[in-house]
């Protein structure tokens, strides 16, 4: 099926490139570099970074300032583990399309993966500025995680709250907010956010993960819910015995 899609996409590029008589040169050129870029992303989805880069380069040859193609090449180099070239093309893409939330989000995710958290927060913050960005809640959530790693608890809390305002039931934001409030000593509000997370678990929309279980254990202890605490601890031990959260639990139980 993927091969069929790529074949059709390639035919589309060739047809567009050849139809110079049905529109102006400018219109045909635009159609061509957009089609080459779409083909590049099709290749990326299959993990074929070599052909993806070739397609994006063809798009850039037709329009050197086409930010989407530069972004595509950056993603291809990121997949190949070439961080130097990936960053070079991410910077080109964001410079050419400074208002693109998607490109700032991609660059921010790249910087986050490379543990460059201060720079990542700047890019992710830019991504949240577009009220029409279809992944805005995710960008807020990523920003919150980034701020937490910079020990900026208040900024992280605000980002997670904004994520939940955009999309009400983001599991990670619910757990992260619950933990931040727990650390503040605001146990009532922490419990409220965690209960919202538990509702999603009970409806089988999501599963517990190491951090959610560790937050649940600490809240249960605070509320003297011995059975709940023991249940969460057993799940944590069985499913995530090598996690940081389980090590913290073991240390707390000594």
Image (cartoon, grey):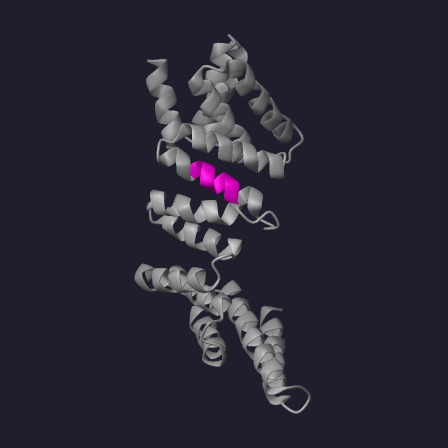
Q: Is residue 151 left or right of residue 58?
A: left
Q: Position of 195 compared to 114: left or right?
A: right
* Place of residue 106 in the rendered image (x, y in percent of width and height, measured from the top left): 46, 54
Magenta stretch bounds: 139-145
- Residue 43 % position (x, y): 51, 69
Q: Which of 24 and 107 is in front in this view?
A: 24
Residue 68 x/y as whole percent:
50, 66
Count of numbered badges drawn on the protein: 0
Is residue 16 or residue 239 the one in the foreground?
16
Q: Is the magenta stretch mostly helix, strand or loop?
A: helix
119 up-or-down from 65: above or below: above
Residue 118 vs 237, above or below: the answer is: below
Which residue ends up furthest to the left in the rendered image?
Answer: 84
Residue 61 in view here: yes
Residue 66's place in the image compared with 112, above or below, is below
- The answer to which image quadrant residue 168 occupies is top right
For the point 56% across and 23% down, the residue is 194
Assign the N terminus to one quadrant of the image.
bottom right
189 inside magenta stretch? no
Query: Is 207 on the left or on the right of 123, as rendered?
Result: right
């Amino acid at each position: 099926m993927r091969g069929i899609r790529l074949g059709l996409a390639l035919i589309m590029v060739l047809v567009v490139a050849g139809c110079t008589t049905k529109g102006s040169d400018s219109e045909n050129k635009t159609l061509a570099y957009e089609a080459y870029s779409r083909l590049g992303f099709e290749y990326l989805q299959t993990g074929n970074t070599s052909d993806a880069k070739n397609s994006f380069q063809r798009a850039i040859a037709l329009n050197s300032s086409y930010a989407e193609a530069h972004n595509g090449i950056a993603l291809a180099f990121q997949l190949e583990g070439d961080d130097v070239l990936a960053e070079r093309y991410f910077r080109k893409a964001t410079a050419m399309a400074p208002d693109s939330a998607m490109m700032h989000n991609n660059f921010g995710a790249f910087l986050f993966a490379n543990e460059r958290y201060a720079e990542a927060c700047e890019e992710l913050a830019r991504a949240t500025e577009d009220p029409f960005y279809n992944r805005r809640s995710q960008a807020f959530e990523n920003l919150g995680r980034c701020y937490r790693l910079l020990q900026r608890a208040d900024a992280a809390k605000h980002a997670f709250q904004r994520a939940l305002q955009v999309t009400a039931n983001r599991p990670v934001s619910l757990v992260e907010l619950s933990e931040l409030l727990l650390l503040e000593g605001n146990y009532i509000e922490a419990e409220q956010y965690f209960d919202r997370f538990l509702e999603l678990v009970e409806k089988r929309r999501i599963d517990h993960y190491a951090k959610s279980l560790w937050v649940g254990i600490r809240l249960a202890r605070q509320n003297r819910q011995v059975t709940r605490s023991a249940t969460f601890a057993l799940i944590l031990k069985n499913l995530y015995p090598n996690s940081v959260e389980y090590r913290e639990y073991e240390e707390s139980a000594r």
